[in-house]
Image (cartoon, rainbow, N blue to C red):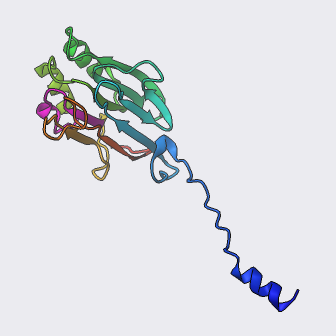
Amino acid sequence: MTTYDNLQNLAKKPKIVVPSPKRHKCDQWSPCPSQSYAYRILSGGGKEKFAKICFEDELIISEEKGNVGRGINIAVVNYDTGKVFAAKYFDMWEGEFSGPMTDFIRKAPLRSLLLMVTHDDGSSRLKEDGKKAIAELGSKEIRNLKFRSSWVFIAGKGFKLPENIENEKINHSDMNKNRYSGWPAEIQIEGCIPKNMTN
């Protein structure tokens, strides 16, 4: 190879290959440690963007599964096994579903994880017994829920989650700031829950 060939090779731009980003459980930005559960809860946005609950890379509640609805959506997961126990939504705009929702929460077994999210409106027909049941799980925002607030929450029943875990978020409807006509932007929480907690 001549000096001229060497100079030409140097002048060529190096080819940079960017690897595709690695996908993590529940589409989190970074992976959870091996001895933990991954979760992501996304509220609904407007009428068209439905709420989602993902646990250990399984969409428990979603439009794709056909089990998401207006009101408060709840998934119950066995903490010790990571298996889904039940998933249901309770309409808080029409009908009387606050009582059945309260029963659903109270009947969740001890050592369950409860993941909750609103779609559209979760407050209009939410009665005091429902607010109390959710507050007893550790919610600090359930009594602040307003018409069409976006709200997400995760709790342990019979045990406490670590304090550094993102476990609740709320966003109120504000006509001056809403992303959608009449509805606030979606909100989400995600994180990693250590396995084998005993408290």
- In this rendered view, identify the residue nearer to me: 44 or 159: 44
Kindly identify the residue that appears in the image at 75 percent across and 87 percent down.
Answer: 7
Q: Is residue 129 above or below residue 158?
A: above
Magenta highlight range: 137-154
Where is the N terminus found, in terms of image quarters? bottom right
Q: Is residue 94 above or below residue 24?
A: above
Q: Is residue 151 magenta?
A: yes
- In this rendered view, identify the residue nearer to me: 48 or 73: 48
Q: Position of residue 104 (x, y in %)?
A: 29, 18
Q: Position of residue 158 (x, y in %)?
A: 29, 34
User: Looking at the rendering, which quadrant does residue 66 occupy?
Assistant: top left
35 displayed left or right of 97: right
User: Looking at the rendering, which quadrant does residue 71 occupy?
Assistant: top left
The single residue placed furthest to the right in the displayed view is 1
- In this rendered view, identify the residue nearer to me: 111 or 166: 166
102 displayed left or right of 195: left
